């Protein structure tokens, strides 16, 4: 390839520079060798840096992109490099078409002048003239109220049930069951739950029965509604 020479300040951006380099090859964008294009582009960026010019970030970003394409192309499997090169060619085609279209629009606009005048203050009528159905106003109100409430902290009443919630321990229900069965004889299993005041108390009672049965301190007879429970002899405490 012939060594390229170019002016530093003629390119509007990295795409403009790449199109310039491609034109030096005298080939179409789809046939340009991307790897050789990388070296040409980096040569331009280095020349900008040697002349202490401010290198725009977009030029450096494109340089990094081209170097990455070249790097992955050196791998044994370089499908990614082919894909990235095709993407770059597609972007160059789009940029070229935009430049051609912009040139045509500029040519068509040639000869047309522009007019200007001093800014003028326009009268503003702040009267709200739009009409709304009643249901629209109602929905807007509900929506506004709902958003306002969502920004507020929850009221104290919302925590009252949580704070006042009574936690019933299994140990307390074990004592209750032993006391209830200490009179001797069998009692219906469901009778242990008849005076429960909360779900927590019922769960604790059931767990207490399981604990006593596992410890072999109570005997359970029957099944279903006919289930009975009694305290084993010698277990009163």
Image (cartoon, helix red, strand yellow):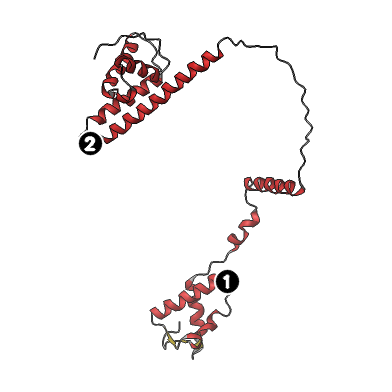
Q: Residue furthest left?
A: 76
The residue lying toward the viewer, choosing from 148 and 127, is: 127
Tell me residue 10's x, y (percent): 40, 10
Tell me residue 161's x, y (percent): 61, 61
Q: Residue at x 54, y 83 (%)?
A: 191
Q: Residue at x 66, y 45 (%)?
A: 148
Q: From what the image shows, is residue 169 above or below residue 35?
A: below
Which residue does the numbered mark 2 point to in the structure image? 77
Few, some or many C-alpha atoms within 10 Å of disc 2 (few <14, some 14-19, many ≥20)? few
- Toward which corner of the image does residue 219 lie, by quadrant? bottom left
Which residue does the numbered mark 1 point to in the structure image? 198
Tell me residue 152's x, y (percent): 64, 46
Check whether the beta carbons of the residues at disc 2 and disc 1 lie within 8 A of each other. no
Q: Secondary structure at mark 2?
A: loop
Few, some or many C-alpha atoms within 10 Å of disc 1 (few <14, some 14-19, many ≥20)? some
Q: Residue furthest bottom?
A: 185
Left or right: 142 in relation to 228:
right
């Amino acid at each position: 390839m012939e060594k390229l020479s170019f002016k530093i300040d003629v390119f509007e951006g990295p795409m403009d520079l790449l199109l310039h380099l491609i034109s030096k090859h005298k080939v179409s964008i789809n046939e340009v060798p991307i790897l050789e294009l990388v070296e040409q582009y980096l040569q331009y960026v280095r020349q900008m840096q040697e002349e202490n010019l401010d290198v725009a970030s977009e030029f450096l970003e494109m340089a990094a992109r081209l170097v990455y394409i070249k790097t992955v192309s050196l791998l044994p499997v370089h499908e990614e490099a082919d894909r990235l090169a095709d993407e770059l060619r597609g972007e160059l085609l789009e940029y070229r078409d935009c430049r051609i279209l912009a040139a045509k629009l500029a040519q068509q606009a040639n000869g047309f002048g522009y007019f200007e005048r001093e800014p003028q203050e326009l009268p503003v009528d702040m009267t709200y003239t739009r009409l709304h159905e009643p249901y629209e106003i109602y929905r807007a109100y509900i929506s506004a109220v709902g958003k306002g409430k969502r920004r507020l902290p929850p009221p104290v009443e919302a925590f009252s049930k949580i704070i006042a919630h009574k936690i019933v321990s299994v140990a307390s229900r074990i004592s209750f069951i032993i006391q209830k069965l200490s009179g001797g004889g069998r009692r219906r299993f469901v009778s242990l739950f008849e005076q429960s005041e909360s779900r927590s108390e019922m769960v604790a009672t059931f767990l207490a029965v399981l604990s006593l049965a596992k410890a072999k301190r109570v005997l359970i007879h029957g099944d279903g509604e006919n289930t009975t429970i009694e305290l084993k002899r010698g277990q009163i405490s």
